[in-house]
């Protein structure tokens, strides 16, 4: 990964309390897993940003290297990599996700 790409992803992760690297956008998810994440975050009623990896092939490859996680979507809360769709669903069902985003948005 180039230093420029590293900086670009760092900035996206750090400038947004909650950011999702996904296929499509929050208004038009382009895969079921990305849609799951959007639905969960929308249900929580929290502000979040999305980065469409289909629109930027450099980020599409770079984010996998950045997180050392092979799949999309990827969710970051307060600069920390949380996981993908399955992990978010599990955290939401346990109530852990609500708590995590509340803390992130309060900071």
Image: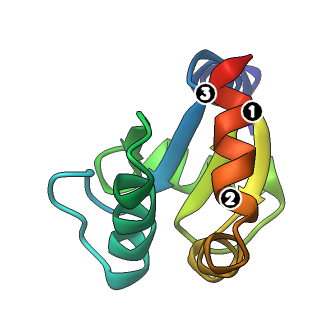
Q: Quadrant of residue 11?
A: top right
* Disc 3/disc 2 C-alpha distance (Å): 13 Å
Above or below residue 63? Residue 87 is: below
Which label sits in the foreground, 3 or 1? 1
Tell me if residue 39 can be seen: yes
Q: Are marks 3 and 2 in contact (CB under 8 Å)?
A: no
Write the residue at 57% across / 37% down: 18
Q: Quadrant of the N terminus?
A: top right
Depth check, mark 3 against mark 2: the one in front is 2
Q: Position of residue 28 (x, y in %)?
A: 15, 59
- Counting from the top left corner in percent of width and height, residue 17 is at 61, 27
Q: Which mark is drawn over residue 97? A: 2
Residue bearing the label numbered 1: 103
User: In what element is the residue under mark 2?
Assistant: helix
Counting residues from the start of the chain, the first of labels 1 and 2 encountered is 2
In the picture provided, is 32 more to the left or to the right than 96? Answer: left
Tag count: 3
Q: How does the figure colour the protein chain or chains?
A: rainbow
Tell me the CA gap for discs 3 and 1.
10 Å
Task: Look at the image and tell me whether residue 5 can be seen.
Answer: no
Distance from disc 1 to disc 2, alpha carbons, whole Å, reads: 10 Å
The quadrant of the picture occupied by the C terminus is top right
Q: Are marks 1 and 2 in contact (CB under 8 Å)?
A: no
Q: Which residue is at 54% across, 69% downward?
A: 72
Name the residue carrying label 3: 17
Say whether disc 3 or disc 1 marks the residue closer to the N-terminus: 3
- Neighbours of disc 2 within 10 Å: few (<14), some (14-19), many (20+): many
Question: What is the quadrant of residue 32 in the picture?
Answer: bottom left
Element type at marker 1?
Answer: helix
């Amino acid at each position: 990964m180039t230093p420029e790409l590293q900086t670009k992803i760092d900035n996206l992760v750090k400038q947004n309390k909650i950011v999702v690297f996904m296929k499509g956008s929050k208004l038009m998810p382009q895969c079921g897993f990305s849609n799951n994440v959007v639905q969960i975050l929308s249900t929580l009623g929290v502000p979040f940003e999305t980065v469409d990896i289909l629109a930027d092939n450099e980020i599409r490859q770079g984010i996998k290297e950045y997180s050392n996680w092979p799949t999309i979507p990827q969710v970051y809360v307060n600069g920390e990599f949380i996981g993908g769709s399955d992990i978010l669903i599990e955290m939401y069902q346990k109530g852990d996700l609500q708590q995590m985003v509340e803390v992130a948005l309060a900071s």
